[in-house]
Image (cartoon, helix red, strand yellow):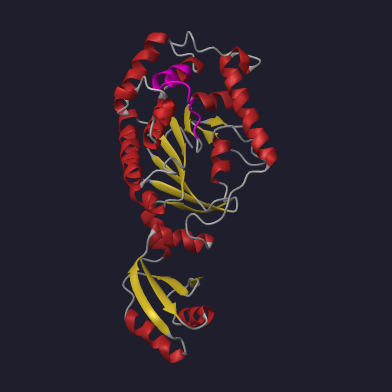
Amino acid sequence: MPASCSSRRRWLLGPNGAGKSTTLGVLTTEVQPTRGKAYVGGHDVRLQPLEVRSSIGVVFQDSVLDNEFSGRENLRLRARLWRMPRPDSRRRIDQLLAVMGLEERADDNVRTYSGGMRRRLEIARALLARPRVIVLDEPTTGLDPAMRDASWRLIDRLRRDEGVTIVLSTHYLEEAEGVCDRVAIVDRGRLVAAGRPDALVEELGGQLVELRVDTDPRKAADALAATGLSERRPLIRGDAVALPVPAGVDQLGARVAALSGDGVRVTASTVRRSTLADVFAHLTGLPAGDGEEVPTPDQVFKLVSTRCDMLADALGLHHLGQLDTADAP
């Protein structure tokens, strides 16, 4: 992630368990890479972790807000961890609360906030120290569609106004296709594709032929592959078979109709524009959201230990018991 890629939106896509959160953990120095190199803002995540942390803001998948504090107090605590001068932190906190639409509830206990309000406060917390890169790990998980849409509009406005690079992970493919500059798709810990969403869709094939059959779908897939419509292998999902084809293929309908002569009983057929979700499915064999990512106890222990160490380093403390927010800025 070079320092020059400012004000961009980078998306990390993959099934649950593909390695999205682990990748973000490496980029935020919470997870030690086993091999290879990674750079954030020109800093090596393994050799320069403090420099990396000072240049990023992170919104974790799970909330890290303190429910016993107000929204303003949560931001004050964060400002103290970053050792921001008190006058600067006050101005910045007031600015972010206004931008996030939280001014009227700033002094209310976070426990009383809605899910959308908590998410906005998490984003404000990540932006507090004016980072060059902000990392969002599935930021709209658990939000209703209206709140998800509002969150993306807010994130896009912040990208323009703050001039930061935004790196996100998500399995909401329609969101990624609509608002990101570049996506990377990971599967089982490996990068399987990267590029602009429209370029990835075009590479797959501009159209998608979808068939529903009441015969063996494997037989239908073989017959569809034999038509020569595409060099790609059809994807089977239940009783449906899907094949991406280049846009503008001649006599597409006639070729699909001819499958009935090959003993394939087609109950429904559709030809539509390909989407990023189709790219995802053909590269991973899964629709977005499939799979299950369950951390091992060792991974949990390492993650908690790393976050405690980061907090202690920021405060210059040997243990968290010395933390006192009474004189926070």
- Name above or below for residue 16 compared with residue 55: below
Nearest to the observer: residue 241 or residue 7: 241
Q: Position of residue 8 (x, y in %)?
A: 38, 39
Q: Position of residue 204 (x, y in %)?
A: 43, 64
User: Residue at the spot x=37%, y=32% of the render?
Assistant: 117
The part of the chain drawn in magenta is: 63-77
Residue 229 seen from this side: no
Residue 30 seen from this side: yes
- Tell me, yes or no, whether the highlighted magenta stretch contains residue 75: yes
The picture quadrant where one finds residue 201 is: bottom left
Q: Position of residue 185 (x, y in %)?
A: 49, 52
In this rendering, would 187 be left or right of 150? right
Q: Residue furthest right?
A: 298
User: Residue at the spot x=34%, y=28% of the render?
Assistant: 162
- Name above or below for residue 267 compared with residue 9: below
User: Residue at the spot x=38%, y=82% of the render?
Assistant: 256
- Tell me, yes or no, whether the highlighted magenta stretch contains residue 146: no
Nearest to the observer: residue 274 or residue 123: 123
